[in-house]
Image: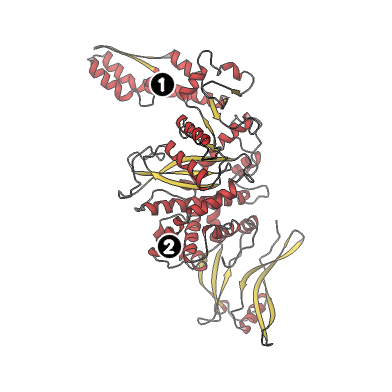
Amino acid sequence: MSNRSGAVHVVRVRKSHTDKHGQVHDYQSAYLRRTFRDGGKVRNETVANLSALPAHVIDWVEAGLKGHSLVPADAAATVARSVPHGHVAAVWAQAVALDLPGLLGPAGRHRDLALALIIARVVHPASKLATASWWDDTTLGADLDVAGASTDETYAAMDWLLGRQDTIEAKLAKRHLAPEVNPHRMALFDLSSSWLEGTHCPLAARGYSRDGKKNRAQIEYGLLTDPAGRPVAIRVFAGNTADPTAFIDAVKIVRDKFKLTTMVMVGDRGMVTAARIDALRADNADPKRDSDLGWLTALRAPAIKQLAAAGGPLQPTLFDQQDLAEISHPDYPGERLIACRNPFLADDRARKRGELLAATEDLLAPVVAAVTAGRLHGADQIGLKVGKVINTYKMAKHLEVAITDTTLEVTRKRDQIAAEAALDGIYVLRTSVPADTLDPAGVVGAYKDLANVERDFRSIKADDLDLRPIYHRLEDRVRAHVLIAMLAAYLTWHLRKALAPLTFTDEHPPTHTDPVAPATRSTAAHRKASRRTDASGQPVRSFRTLLNHLATLTRNDIRYGGPDGPIVPTLAVPTETQRHAFELLHTTIPLNLR
């Protein structure tokens, strides 16, 4: 890490230029700079540009820095305004490193507003109107010239961005899904949902709510990523869209828009169904398609039971010496089946089943007591009472209920419970990827990469970007809002990785020799979490708290020489954490964003 002090000095730079008429023009600039040593090199950091000041004022500043007392401090300089700068400067630096401005499109007012919306979604997620007001209170608004932007301008920028979605996503696909950077040709896809406020959006519908908002209309959106979880494309659907329908759209994006004809689509068991696999086979067989799209997914419970039936290939002895094995079955021609057993998952499922059965019996106990005491009688009345509670915890399938007009007996189906318990912790993956491309352990690892998509959804919906609820009414505005969140998630993914040493993120997770075993954290990550400091004793923070700390690095408008004196923008002295953050982003702290 570099060794810096807070001392600054004045540097004067003189340049001359001879124009085409032979006239010589002399220029002089003055800068306030801080010199520091970075390893064995001496580097400079520009703190302020003093060129706008009169020459005698620059002399005063230089004299003051050398220790001369010229005038009372309150008469020499006053802070006219101070605005947060460090957080937007860090996000801007990462955006520039990713060439996000170029990714969005040609320079112009629409691009500046769209980029400001994306950066604001990372730093300070809020409604569009609140965001436009927030721009005025940070350096982002002044430096990107978006302060004071009207509502119509903001919405016009969203419409412009949505019109460029296909082009943007094609560029991201080339970066992260092309064979050169994705040798196994894996693409992950999953679906999530978020609820809306209001009742007039055409996309709003009631469906399976992944947010637990069963009484609210919602939209659904499918996210396509590379194996590491970098967002590549996103699509918005009506709130009652089924997972397989969304998967069809993802396949069309990969095949038709990105022109990637040889890919492996990875999705969960509810997404990549047997019907969707049959459709992929048909597309691959169509000579007009010229495609070879593969799949990797998991079998549903009934299919696993069929494999485990008497004489089937999925028998307990498979896991006597190992926790995964490759099997085959005539129902899956041309596919590989990778059977896995996770003992930790098996124990957890057995515990949950026992707890839910006991909880269901506790709910039924008052009904049994009422029947026994004669307070409840009649088979129909007893049946109504039992029906209200028996499936509260989805355990009715494991209970045998015998009802007469005067009796109620509830017993467990022990043979059925034992048969289900025998499959605890077992899951089976199915894939078309050949063994010479991906071994069984690689198949398990690729399927587990779906956790990266889930992490993206948490970032988009809750942890970082606060996508929900959605307030837009027009269909295209909803799509643009979700696209902004996806691009902000792309930016956040890289920021989290770059700033990992300053956060609780596990920078070097242990290498797993057993792909089926649960993931573990490194000793260094546990140490950071318990001590809240890194190995050198510097504080570590959550990603969101780190951004808040960076915001305390302000840019101050300092007025010199009285009420009519010139104003010089000047950075506050950075903390060690703030310095380190920009070093991790491979840039010095900028005085201006551009």
Residue 152 coordinates in the image, percent (x, y) = 38, 64
Residue 134 coordinates in the image, percent (x, y) = 44, 62
Query: Are the residues tagged 2 and 1 within 8 Å (C-beta)?
Result: no
> Closer to the N terminus: mark 2 or mark 1?
2
Residue closest to the eye, 263 or 261: 261
- Would you name the residue on which mark 2 appears? 132
Q: Which mark is residue 358?
A: 1
Q: Secondary structure at mark 2?
A: helix
- The amino acid sitting under disc 2 is Ala
Q: Is residue 531 above or below residue 163?
A: above
Left or right relative to 258: residue 43: right
Task: Please say whether residue 512 is visible from this viewpoint.
Answer: yes
Binning the other alpha carbons within 10 Å of mark 2 as few (below 14), some (14 to 19) or many (20 upward) gives many
Binning the other alpha carbons within 10 Å of mark 1 as few (below 14), some (14 to 19) or many (20 upward) gives few
Q: Quadrant of the C terminus?
A: bottom right
Q: Secondary structure at mark 1?
A: helix
Which residue is at the far right?
40
